[in-house]
Image (cartoon, coloured by chain):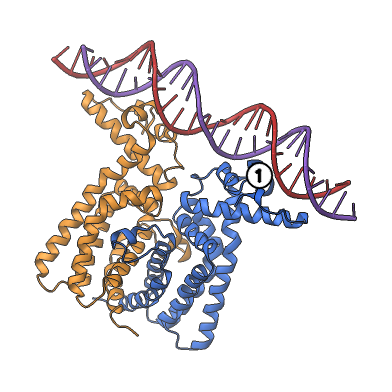
Chain colours: A orange, B blue, C purple, D red
Amino acid sequence: MSRATRKKPRSKAEQRAESIEQILDAAEFLFSKNGLYGVTLRDVAKRVGIHTTLVHYYFQDKQNLFEEVFARRAGVTSGRRMAALEAYEAEAGETPTVEGALRAFLDTDLDLYYEGGEHWMNYAAFCARVSNTPEGAELMDRHFDPVVLKLVSIVKKALPHYSDEDIFWGYHFVTGALMNTLARTGRIDRLSDGLCKSDDFPAVKARIARFMAAGFMSLGTKV
Amino acid sequence: MSRATRKKPRSKAEQRAESIEQILDAAEFLFSKNGLYGVTLRDVAKRVGIHTTLVHYYFQDKQNLFEEVFARRAGVTSGRRMAALEAYEAEAGETPTVEGALRAFLDTDLDLYYEGGEHWMNYAAFCARVSNTPEGAELMDRHFDPVVLKLVSIVKKALPHYSDEDIFWGYHFVTGALMNTLARTGRIDRLSDGLCKSDDFPAVKARIARFMAAGFMSLGTKV
DNA sequence: ATTATCTATAGATCTATAGATAATGC
DNA sequence: ATTATCTATAGATCTATAGATAATGC
């Protein structure tokens, strides 16, 4: 991994791009573990094998580095999910189902992380880690509101007699379960004594949309 | 709030107890917002209106303060939920339901935070904030494993033909939804344009156990 | 000529401790 | 006498910048 052992890239543009990528990768990994305040720019630089000042050179300050880590992959995930939701909407016509909408939203995302390899898994953990922090909340709003509101609109069409409150609270449960998955804390591994594994996204994908769709349906049957 | 404006407590034991409580309250609030690394002992001392050294005097170091914030209320919440689960188990006999078990687990906890006032709400946010961090994971295991495993055992009895994997993954979704509730990030407020409110725990209580129970039931119907 | 990278360092924290002072306790 | 609280400070960071050096670009 050390920079010295690798052949230098030829052009300056390549050098620049590679340094920026490496810094973002290192920051993404470290922020996902320890959050904004638990990571120093020295940690990031050390992980890449460069001097701290280079991080400042490319990213000005820490807050900006953090936001660029968030932004780098946010467009890809929200774009993919938006496309999947729109495709489902077109396909389902006037009779969409909650489960269909959730599959487009959840399964598409789980696939992206799982099939995207280590970096995408780190990004998933990063998002989960910051989703319940003041720093992260505003970023979540800015990058993910459109795709979430699209999901909500399809669920509303599937459940026309539901109150908006029921639908938003249902989404609140869905996103909690998703974030707990992306975080991969290892808690489920320890609780189940190794039976379930935090990074087994296929196991989650096999269950989450169906589970959550059934949850939504239950909110219609008032007691 | 300032310490100078208040009459000093009489005995040393009282003084000691009051200082310790105030430090824990301040740390709980600040850690819930910014996590272990986002809070300095100076921040904590400043919020209480004492000198930083007093925090060291009572709590040795930061890590220990953090753990004591966690531990102070952990026994109460896990004890209450354990009692509720045992009562439900006795009442339901050989035919417990998933929803009954979840009500004992979830509603009991939501009541505690909501009826316990500001401090308990802060503790809830603190737990949610640290639940997906390395620092917090080990504390969650240590303090909450017994009550979670009790819940799991009742759900197993309610769903005897289910695989253990299905039950643990179901719990994983439940705890994600619960933590997202306790965190009170305000995201649901903004998404729903004020219709739902993060601190409206009664609204969550009205839905979460039924929603999650229906989710569990759906895992039995393989497609 | 321009850009990537490093050296050196200022200035501002932060944690933690030693030792002094002030208040209660017997 | 003992315990709570404060003063002073050491030592170790951390962020950020100025300016030097080394590598590519034309």
> On the rendered image, what quadrant is the N terminus of chain A found in?
top left
Q: Is residue D6 left or right of residue C15?
A: right
- Residue closest to the eye, B37 or B194: B194
Q: Position of residue B106 (x, y in %)?
A: 45, 73
Using the rendered view, name the quadrant where residue A203 is placed: bottom left
Q: Chain of mark 1?
A: B
Residue type at mark 1: give it: His
B87 relative to B46, above or below: below
**Which residue position is annotated with label 1?**
B56
**Image point (31%, 58%), residue name:** B190
Q: Is residue A116 left or right of residue C24?
A: left
A159 relative to C22, above or below: below
Q: Is residue B195 left or right of residue B65?
A: left
Density class for disc 1 (Cα within 10 Å; few <14, some 14-19, many ≥20) is some
**Image point (21%, 78%), residue name:** A161
Q: Position of residue B105 (x, y in %)?
A: 48, 74
Q: Position of residue B204 (x, y in %)?
A: 39, 71
Using the rendered view, name the quadrant where residue D6 is placed: top right
Question: Tag 1's secondary structure?
Answer: helix
* Residue A200 visible in the current orientation: no
> On the rendered image, what quadrant is the C terminus of chain A found in?
bottom left
B39 relative to B128, above or below: above
